Image (cartoon, grey):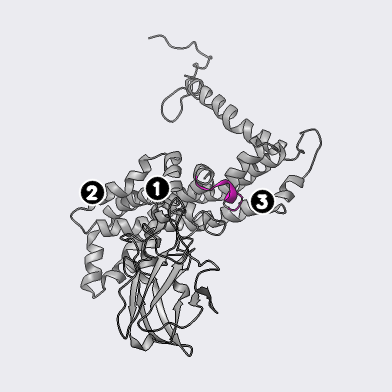
């Protein structure tokens, strides 16, 4: 082994990084990633910031004009307000549901299967989820699941009308009544047949089980009659007469009124016939307005007032499973001794959950909440697909408005760039809080 000549210092070995890798080699490996990061992240951010200070054409300097327009234009202001609703509501609801699901499924035997079902929507793309919920929120109860359920519940507690557009002709023995409905033009008598013809009901919309109408047998001391649809398919029928093939108005409510007081009431049979007791002799027959109310078609989920909560509901459906899985993982690491000690000290399950479980899960809940807050700022697909064109302005969010301003028919890249910068500014504080929390956890 030769040594360095006297008086000449030995040549130092190439410096290495902490991991033992030479810095030149490390830089060589990092360079492609840095180039991609600069080309795909740093340069677009810089260009967007610069472009946001120019007008639509990009030739004239606009200063902060584009940013002022974000908070003065009605459409853009709606997008900002909706984003605030999204950031506050969607992550909170999804995290709360995830927490509830994680805690409850820990106590049941089929918890794994339940978690699988709740997490399954995460495997569906935003596009597919949007199409699914566009069908769920259909206004027609025969097509939309949400309205089918809502109408079913409503009709359980509120009687629905079977003849919403039924009405008499001027030649019929019925006239409009005060407050709605119809009354006979004169009193009815026992032993005579009262006829109550109506039109305006499509044969296909007649009540199920309606049969061909007929005149009832006259009964002494009783008021009898027929209520029927005075319409013959193909024409040729006679007015005020029961013709073959004409259907009875099954279920039509009929009231006998004397001196403003209802003395008797009944409903028409499947063939339209009805009978009233002797008390109805000399009374006026009234068809109350309840027979003619428009059928309840449910809620306009995708209307201007409910479209944003409806879209948020679809987002929660997708991401509650994500929150549940992360919270369940954190819950598995909670010391069971602490929970049991709280129960031994006399705490009930709600107190254990509120005073022990939730505080111990606070770091996990913070991670889930912050992650979802960042995620909702980028929501675009669900709003674009679920909200119909007539309500898209009411459901507008910044990410959607960014697309519309940058690539729409009347594109304004100045406004689009300003929206992009605003989204970046909104994300940075959330990311800073998350990074600070992660560093604090790492130092423990």
Which one is closest to the eye, mark 2 or mark 3? 3
Q: Is residue 38 above or below residue 175?
A: above
- What residue occupies the far top of the structure in this picture? 2
Residue placed under numbered mark 3 in the picture: 75
Q: Is 121 inside the magenta-drawn segment? A: no
- What residue occupies the far bottom of the structure in this picture? 259
Viewer-side residue, 398 vs 325:
398
Which of the 4 image quarters holds residue 66? top right
Distance between the Cα atoms at labels 3 and 1? 28 Å
Q: Dot 3 lies on which element?
A: helix
Q: Is residue 75 above or below residue 340?
A: above
Q: Position of residue 122 (x, y in %)?
A: 37, 43
Query: Could you tell me which residue is drawn at 44 percent across and 31 percent down?
Result: 18
Does residue 242 appear to the left or right of 88 in the view shown?
left
Q: Is residue 47 visible?
A: yes
Q: Position of residue 134 (x, y in %)?
A: 46, 47
Picture disc at residue 113: 2
Residue placed under numbered mark 1 in the picture: 318
């Amino acid at each position: 082994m030769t040594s360095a000549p006297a008086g000449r210092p030995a040549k130092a070995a190439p410096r290495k990084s902490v991991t033992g890798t030479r810095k030149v080699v490390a830089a060589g490996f990092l360079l492609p990633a840095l180039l991609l990061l600069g080309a795909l992240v740093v340069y677009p951010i810089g260009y967007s910031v610069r472009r946001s200070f120019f007008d639509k054409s990009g030739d004239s300097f606009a200063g902060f004009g584009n940013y002022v327009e974000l908070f003065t234009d009605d459409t853009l202001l709606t997008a900002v307000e909706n984003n605030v609703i999204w950031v506050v509501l969607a992550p909170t609801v999804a995290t709360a549901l995830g927490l509830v699901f994680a805690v409850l499924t820990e106590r049941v035997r089929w918890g794994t299967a339940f978690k699988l079902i709740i997490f399954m929507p995460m495997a569906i793309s935003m596009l597919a989820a949007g199409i699914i919920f566009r069908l769920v929120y259909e206004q027609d109860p025969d097509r939309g699941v949400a309205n089918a359920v809502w109408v079913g519940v409503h009709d359980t507690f509120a009687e629905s009308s079977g003849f919403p557009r039924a009405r008499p002709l001027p030649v019929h023995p019925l006239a409009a009544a005060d407050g709605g409905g119809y009354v006979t033009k004169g009193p009815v008598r026992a032993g005579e047949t009262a006829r109550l013809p109506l039109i305006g009901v499509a044969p296909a919309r007649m009540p199920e089980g309606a049969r061909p109408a007929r005149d009832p047998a006259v009964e002494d001391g009783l008021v009898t009659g027929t209520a029927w649809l005075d319409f013959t398919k193909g024409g040729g029928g006679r007015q005020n007469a029961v013709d073959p093939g004409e259907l009875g108005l099954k279920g039509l409510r009929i009231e006998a009124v004397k001196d403003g007081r209802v003395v008797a009431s009944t409903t028409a049979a499947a063939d339209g016939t009805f009978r009233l007791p002797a008390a109805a002799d000399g009374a006026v027959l009234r068809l109350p307005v309840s027979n003619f109310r428009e059928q309840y078609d449910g809620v306009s989920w995708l209307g201007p007032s409910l479209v944003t909560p409806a879209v948020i509901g679809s987002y929660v459906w997708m991401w509650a499973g994500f929150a549940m899985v992360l919270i369940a993982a954190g819950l598995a690491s909670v010391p069971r001794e602490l929970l049991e000690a709280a129960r031994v000290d006399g705490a009930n399950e709600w107190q254990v959950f509120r005073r022990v479980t939730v505080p111990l899960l606070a770091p996990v809940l913070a991670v889930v909440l912050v992650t979802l807050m960042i995620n909702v700022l980028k929501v675009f697909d669900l709003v674009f697909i679920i909200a119909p064109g007539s309500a898209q302005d009411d459901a507008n969010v910044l990410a959607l408005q960014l697309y519309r301003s940058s690539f729409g028919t009347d594109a304004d890249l100045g406004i689009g760039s300003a929206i992009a910068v605003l989204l970046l500014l909104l994300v940075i504080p959330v990311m800073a809080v998350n990074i600070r929390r992660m560093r604090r956890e790492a130092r423990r």
